[in-house]
Image (cartoon, rainbow, N blue to C red):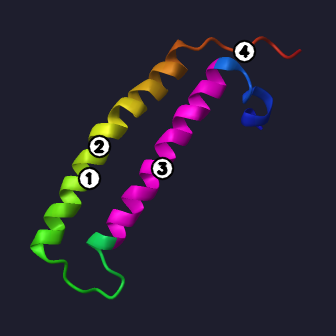
Amino acid sequence: MVFRLFGNLGPVRAAIDIWTEGDAYTLQICALAARAHPADGSAVPPVEQARIRAELHRINGELTPIAARFSSTLANSRAPPALC
């Protein structure tokens, strides 16, 4: 409901766009989790574990500023005008 009512307002639209940008990283993290914990229960070789950790650190480095931008956008937005 909130998205339908306010989704096209400047600050809300900006926050949604930033959130969407972060969604791509969520998909990458899920793929890494599948590699770290194979469905068949097989062990992950140490070299692959190191690659996964390195990739997680890269993602964290890229996602942290996006999360900060999202929070800042919400914090700096004003309440929308009253609807009634």
Query: Does residue 74 lie above or below 4 as drawn?
Result: above
Label whose residue precedes the other's in the sequence (4 or 2) = 2
Amino acid type, mark 3: Ala
Front residue of this view, candidates 74 and 17: 17
Circles 2 and 1 in contact, beta carbons < 8 Å: yes
**Quarter of the image holding residue 33?**
bottom left
Q: Which residue is mark 3?
A: 24
- Magenta stretch, main secondary structure, is helix
Amino acid type, mark 4: Pro
For the record, the magenta segment spans: 11-34
Quadrant placement of the C terminus: top right
Label whose residue precedes the other's in the sequence (1 or 4) = 1
Front residue of this view, candidates 75 and 53: 53
Residue 68, position as x, y percentages in the image:
39, 27
**Quarter of the image holding residue 40?**
bottom left
For label 2, the SS is helix
The CA distance from mark 1 to mark 4 is: 37 Å
Q: Which residue is mark 1?
A: 56
